[in-house]
Image (cartoon, helix red, strand yellow):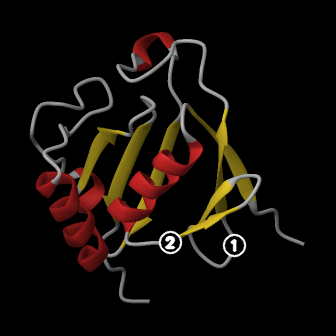
Amino acid sequence: MSIRLDHTIVPAKDKVASAEFFAEIFGLTVVQGHFAQVQINDHLTFAFADEPEAWGGPGLDPRVGQSHHYAFHVSDAEFDAIFSRVKDKGLPYGSDPFDHTNGRINKRRGGRGFYFEDPNGHLLEIMTVPETGT
């Protein structure tokens, strides 16, 4: 059996608002219950919980580890859609985790990528991977 992540708890000041923000940016839906859940794909769910972090986000400082970092590989079309929603909301974004408000995207490993914060100060990373032809 291969190991795969099934779900993770995402601490939030307001689980519903945080889940709705995430779902809107990623073009997904929220299922409410004990957790506000967002099904990322067939194998992964983010379960948002009303458990704010000690640092109180927003305003993460990845240099001192006061954030969660969630990174996603997406297709070029998904990247364009997510990037458009981030820009439409006027959210600061950037090309580097330590400079995630510089208004640029990166072009690492032949793909594109950027970082932005969610309302709780968690750092979200969106990246494409170049087609390999397989």
Q: Nearer the viewer, mark 1 or mark 2?
A: 2
Q: Residue at x 34, y 67 (%)?
A: 129
The crowding category of the residue bearing disc 1, from other C-alpha atoms within 10 Å (few below 14, some 14 to 19, many at least 20), is few
- Name the residue tied to disc 2: 29
Dot 1 lies on which element?
loop
Viewport quadrant of the N terminus: bottom right
Q: Which mark is residue 43?
A: 1
Q: Is residue 64 left or right of residue 49?
A: left
86 or 4: nearer the viewer: 86
Tell me the quarter of the picture where residue 45 sits.
bottom right
Viewport quadrant of the C terminus: bottom left
Dot 2 amino acid type: Thr
Q: Which mark is residue 113?
A: none
Tell me the quarter of the picture where residue 109 sits.
bottom left
Dot 1 amino acid type: His
Q: Is residue 116 left or right of residue 50?
A: left
111 or 14: nearer the viewer: 14
Q: Position of residue 89 (x, y in %)?
A: 17, 51
Q: Residue at x 34, y 75 (%)?
A: 75
Q: Position of residue 17 (x, y in %)?
A: 47, 47
Dot 2 lies on which element?
loop
Q: Position of residue 38 (x, y in %)?
A: 58, 64
Q: Is residue 90 left or right of residue 34?
A: left
Q: Residue at x 38, y 24 (%)?
A: 58
Q: Is residue 122 visible?
A: yes
* Residue farthest toward the left in the current orientation of the protein: 103
Vertical side of 33 occupied by 17: above or below: above
90 or 77: nearer the viewer: 90
Vertical side of 39 occupied by 13: above or below: above
